[in-house]
Image (cartoon, rainbow, N blue to C red):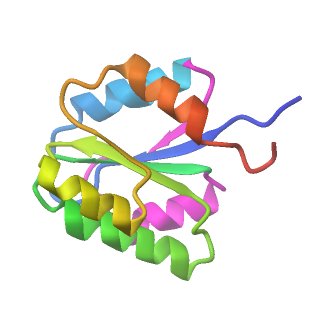
Amino acid sequence: MSARTRVVIAKPGLDGHDRGVKIVARALRDAGMEVIYTGLHQSPEQIVETAIQEDADAVGLSVLSGAHMTLFRRVIELLAERGADDVVVFGGGIIPDEDLPELERLGVAKIFTPGATTQAIVEWARAHIVPAAA
């Protein structure tokens, strides 16, 4: 039996809008992935701790607050510090196009901006997230 992809989905920072992230979490789950949703108002430290504890293959961040540069950078730094820099980091939210190249340089694998379909997110996840036990 092949391993299931494990994805931690998180809402970092002070943003309290979680409808979209719950839809994405459900779509990934319905596609056969194991999804751990951390809930609202998570710190980068809490998100990384969850990813380590859950042996996650990926971390998906939903950021609508405008703090995306700081939050993505910190999650990636903390994963590296914990020896988990093989965890794929992706995300979505209200993120200006001009910030996308810098996020990519930091190591963010993919950013989904408003209008991205759950089908596109699932297809990307299937193609780019490989279960560690595979």
Indicate the quadrant containing the C terminus: top left, top right, bottom left or bottom right: top right
Which percent across, then down, holds residue 7?
Answer: 54, 43
The residue drawn where x is 28% and y is 25% is: 116
Which percent across, then down, holds residue 115?
Answer: 20, 24
25 or 84: which is nearer to us? 84
Task: Reply above or below: 9 against 27.
Answer: below
The residue drawn where x is 54% and y is 25% is: 29
Name which quarter of the figure residue 103 lies in: bottom left
Q: Which residues are magenta?
A: 31-56
Which residue reaches farthest bottom?
A: 81
Tell me if residue 81 is in the magenta stretch.
no
The residue drawn where x is 49% and y is 31% is: 124
Name which quarter of the figure residue 2 lies in: top right
53 or 122: which is nearer to us? 122
Which percent across, then down, holds residue 66?
Answer: 10, 56
The residue drawn where x is 51% and y is 71% is: 79
Q: Relative to residue 104, is residue 52 drawn left or right?
A: right
Which percent across, then down, holds residue 43?
Answer: 31, 66
Q: Residue 29, can we see it?
A: yes
Which residue reaches farthest right?
A: 1
Q: Residue 44, can we see it?
A: no
